[in-house]
Image: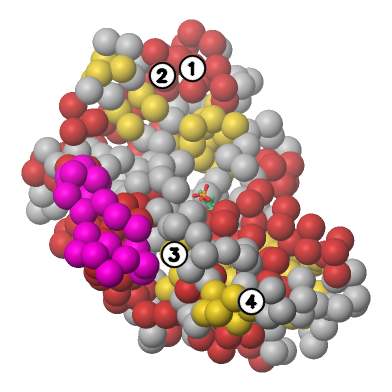
Amino acid sequence: MFPVDKIRADFPILKREVNGKPLVYFDNAATSQTPQVVIDAIVDYYSNSNANIHRGVHTLSQEATDLYEKARLKIQKHFNAKESYEIILTSGTTASINMIASGFSDLLITGDEIIVSALEHHSNIVPWQMLCEKTGAVLKVIPMLQNGTLDIAAYDEILSDKTKLVFCNHVSNALGTINPIKEIIEKAHKVGAAVLIDGAQATPHIKPDVQELDVDFYVASAHKICGPTGVGVLYGKSAWLEKLPPYQGGGEMIETVTFEKTTYAGLPHKFEAGTPNICGGIAFGVALDYMNTIGFDAIAAYEHELLQYGTGKLQEIDGLTIYGTSDKTAVISFNIEGIHPYDIGAILDKLGVAVRTGHHCAQPIMNFYNIPGTVRASFAFYNTKKEIDVLVASVKKAAMMLG
Ligand SMILES: *Cc1c(COP(=O)(O)O)cnc(C)c1O
């Protein structure tokens, strides 16, 4: 049996009340909660090891550097990157994506094509539009199907030797649907295109193996995997990272500087200008350790149980529609006929239940279904069936009050 009670005790925030009711936190797709070991690592860093890294000869600086580089190794191991210098620490998924978009602006020419999926988060659409404007490249979209999956036959048709880059999320944040990224990557490679996978929504549930996927770039945020905000990862194959120009100029990313010429530092420092989120990086490593101790297979199995339980219970409610019904992670995105999702969310909050309402930074998906948004309940491994019962009772109450 999955030790959920023991796990819940690791998360101090789960003990609190909201509006006089026990907190039921179902907004995990927006950010996950933080276990005590990660909080302790943050406190410990600032209490005992705070110093700038890579510069000082003094002991504290060496200690901080050591902790930070050990975190990089943990991240490397988690994603199964071949080399530690293929792991670039960034401020999060959005920053990682923008780094790649910026890097490609030097590599693309008019008439080149970039393919994105219709299931993208806005942070995965806007940088490519900006890149196309700058370079004259053309943006193509893999359309989606009614069940929330991608239309792979249409993908086959838009792929060509003009395609230089393909972007797709591993899991859709709005629907939770899992995309066939291995197939998408293989097909892109056949025409010589690079692939960037946005793993922000997949990494809380799935342990990706970047070598097995043969993916060129894979990005994620620590705050969705029990880590702190403001830190994330950009994995890139070393050949690509060597090829791309640095993103920002500054300290850490240079080897020598004169007013005539600056030479850049090697990987990963070439992409890590300035003082990074040292504490965040260290805490990210601790968060991955924590989740790996529980185990991603156990997490996925338990969350699947929650998903099936919640789906069954919610479907019994009159007029309720669930969007995205294919293979997915523990996300239920739904509406009740005739009721605005925001109104349901506001009543749920009064009852202590935290869900997300709105377009979830994925307006094209909402346009596809012709809806203003959805109510999104996203589960984590520290949630329980009892909490789902509270959600279902609260949704019923909201439907009665608003219907
Ligand atoms: C959350 C999320 C992002 C953005 O992540 P940040 O941490 O805000 O940079 C991007 N893509 C997907 C799929 C997400 O779920």
Dot 2 amino acid type: Asp
Ligand 1 under 8 Å from disc 2 Cβ:
no
* Near-viewer residue (138 or 142): 138
| Tag 1 residue | 346
Disc 3 marks a residue whose amino acid type is Leu
Under mark 4, the amino acid is Thr
Sequence-first disc among 3 and 1: 3
Find out whether residue 78 is within the magenta segment. no
Q: Residue at x 12, y 38 (%)?
A: 9
Is the C-beta separation of discs 4 and 3 under 8 Å?
no
Foreground label between 3 and 1: 3
Choose the circle earlier in sequence order: 3 or 2: 3
The secondary structure type at the circle numbered 3 is strand
The location of residue 303, given as percent across then percent down, is 29, 51
User: Dot 2 corresponds to which residue?
Assistant: 349
Q: Which mark is residue 258?
A: 4
Residue 240 location (% of width, % of height): 59, 84
Q: CA distance from mark 3 to mark 1?
A: 37 Å
Camera-side mark, 1 or 4: 4
Numbered mark located on residue 89 in the image: 3
Counting residues from the N terminus, which is met first, the one under dot 1 or under dot 4? 4
Mark 3 vs mark 2, foreground winner is 3
Query: Residue type at mark 1?
Result: Ala
Q: Among all residues in the image, which is located at the extreme front?
A: 259
